[in-house]
Amino acid sequence: MSNRALGAVRAPRSVRATLGVMLAVSGMALLCLGFKAPALALFAVGLGSVEWDWRIRHAEFRGSVGERFQLALSFYRATHRDRTNRTLHVLGIPLITLGAVGLFAAPPLRVALGALWGVSLAAFAIGWLLNLIGHAAYEKRAPAFSEDALSFVAGPVWDLQQLFRSARSRHE
């Protein structure tokens, strides 16, 4: 099976991967509550479980890290076909990213509920809400990271590629 074909395989994910998604989401919730180290640990273990599941389901994959990332980009593209969903992601992913950075930078909740924490939490939550609406209402499927952990990186990269292509086409 070619590496290109691997990205299109849709075998059911395992219980371990489902648990991994739940752990990653729990990590994000802990970050919102100000528990940074446990948040990172849960998120990392969760994504590791999803990636482990991908590797089991694609045992024949023997490519390089670059080839693996290209598969993740292909899978992300295949799971984000709806124009409205893509638009919501282009808006939501930067909000999630900026919100996460702000939540890491904000003092722990035990110290104070500052403006940085509030704005960061709002950006993080609104970004996720936009992405989830896109999947539920328009794409009609679970977010890509639930099947391919690299989508957490491939998604923002793909969205940036789309923005650059759009900007280039407007200037040509």
Image: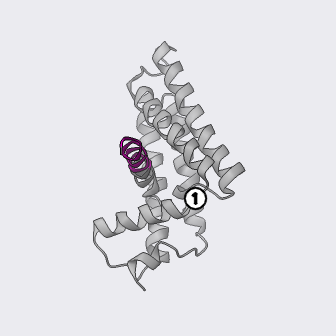
Residue 146 locus on image (x, y percent)? 56, 58
User: What secondary structure is the magenta-colored segment mainly?
Assistant: helix
Q: Is residue 116 above or below residue 128?
A: above
Residue sitting nearer the eye, 28 or 93? 93
> Which quarter of the figure has residue 102?
top left
For the record, the magenta segment spans 159-171
Q: Is residue 73 above or below residue 25?
A: below
Residue at the bottom extreme of this rendering? 1
User: Taking the image as drawn, is residue 109 in sight?
Assistant: no
User: Taking the image as drawn, is residue 125 in sight?
Assistant: yes
- Is residue 169 a member of the stretch shown in magenta? yes
Circle 1 is placed at which residue position?
Answer: 81
* Drawn side of residue 2 relative to residue 146, left or right: left
Quadrant in which the N terminus is drawn: bottom left
* Drawn side of residue 40 relative to residue 24, left or right: left
**Rendered residue at 38%/25% (across/down):** 105
**Rendered residue at 59%/32% (across/down):** 126
What coloring was used for the rendering?
A: one colour
Residue 133 locus on image (x, y percent)? 67, 44
- Is residue 16 a member of the stretch shown in magenta? no
Residue 119 locus on image (x, y percent)? 51, 20
Residue 69 locus on image (x, y percent)? 36, 63
The number of discs equals 1
Q: Amino acid at mark 1?
A: Arg
Residue sitting nearer the eye, 118 or 123? 123
**Rendered residue at 58%/69% (across/down):** 13
**Rendered residue at 45%/67% (across/down):** 52
